[in-house]
Image (cartoon, rainbow, N blue to C red):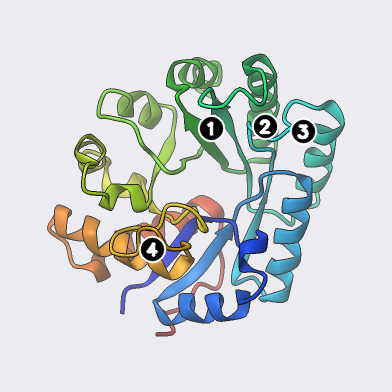
Amino acid sequence: MPRLVDTHCHLDFDSFDDDRDEVLDRARQAGLVRCVAVAVDIPSAERSLALSRATDGYLVATVGLHPNEESAGDPAALDRVEELARTGAFVAIGETGLDTYRDDVPLERQVDSLRRHLALALDLDLPVILHCRDAFEPLAAVLAESAGASLRGVLHCYTGTRTELPALLEAGLHIGAGGIATFKNSHELRAALDEVPDERLLLETDAPFLAPAPMRGKRNEPAFVAHTATYLAERRGLTTERLGEITTDNAVALFGLTDVGPAAG
């Protein structure tokens, strides 16, 4: 049984309201020892924290403003992110980042929000969870502003190529591999993930989105991270158990997870 961590899921979303307990049971049976419940706004952070407490820390929570959320860049919302983060109840700042695929929030506001999140992560010595869609160049430029500042975190749901990878690794980031890596036409992505060092690789689902093959088209859930683990392990010439140990150790170190025991399945 592989020992796994889903480093990016949204179990507070209402798509899990009818069967959240069953979803968590399936996660445990699939070998997951922790799930990182990632916030997209203030209510999401508060719900994720409540879930963390209700599951005795099996879920751990983050706090941040997704770049496509209306509250991104809002000074009052950013102040609340900082207030919550300083309670010590959250394991990471985010998700934050840049996204020009949609035009819901002007890029200037996204950049302001990202800078505030990065500063907070550095101040509190917490990892940052980054989202990037069609915005690699401006994201790399903002990350370069923190060069030498011991930034750590993860670019989640990586969809880039080998070209973008060096700048992200140099910035101190881990790379989150999700279900897209298993899609039939993701040739460039898989080639990029092949070059991610073992010590920088993380597994994730982004549940309820982007279920991996063979579950594509279904609502994603943390248990499905096992499919991604098996797929990537084969590409790396590893057993799924070994890849699970590597990526779980990475997640434990990055997010400061404690009391992570063996898989329950």
The answer to whether residue 118 is seen in the rendering is: yes
CA–CA distance in space, label 4 to label 3: 30 Å
Which of the marked residues, 4 or 2, is nearer the chain's N terminus?
2
Work out which quarter of the rendered image holds the N terminus and state it. Answer: bottom left
Front residue of this view, candidates 148 and 158? 158
The residue depicted at 48 percent of the width and 62 percent of the height is: 219
Which residue does the numbered mark 3 point to in the structure image?
71
Q: Position of residue 213 (x, y in %)?
A: 29, 59
- Seen in the picture, residue 234 relative to 117 is either above or below; the reply is below
List the residue tagged with mark 1.
Answer: 151
Q: CA–CA distance between discs 4 and 2? A: 27 Å
Secondary structure under tag 4 reads helix
Circle 1 SS class: loop
Q: CA distance from mark 3 to mark 1?
A: 24 Å
- N-terminal of the pair, mark 4 or mark 1, is 1
10 Å neighbourhood of mark 2: few (<14), some, or many (≥20)?
many
Residue in view at x 67 percent, y 24 percent: 105
Q: Nearer the viewer, mark 4 or mark 2?
A: 4
**On the rendered image, what quadrant is the C terminus found in?**
bottom left
Q: Amino acid at mark 3?
A: Ser
Q: Disc 4 or 3, which lies upstream in sequence?
A: 3
Q: Going 79% across and 39% down the picture, which residue do you hit?
A: 82
The label number, if any, that marks residue 81 in the structure image:
none
Disc 2 target residue: 117
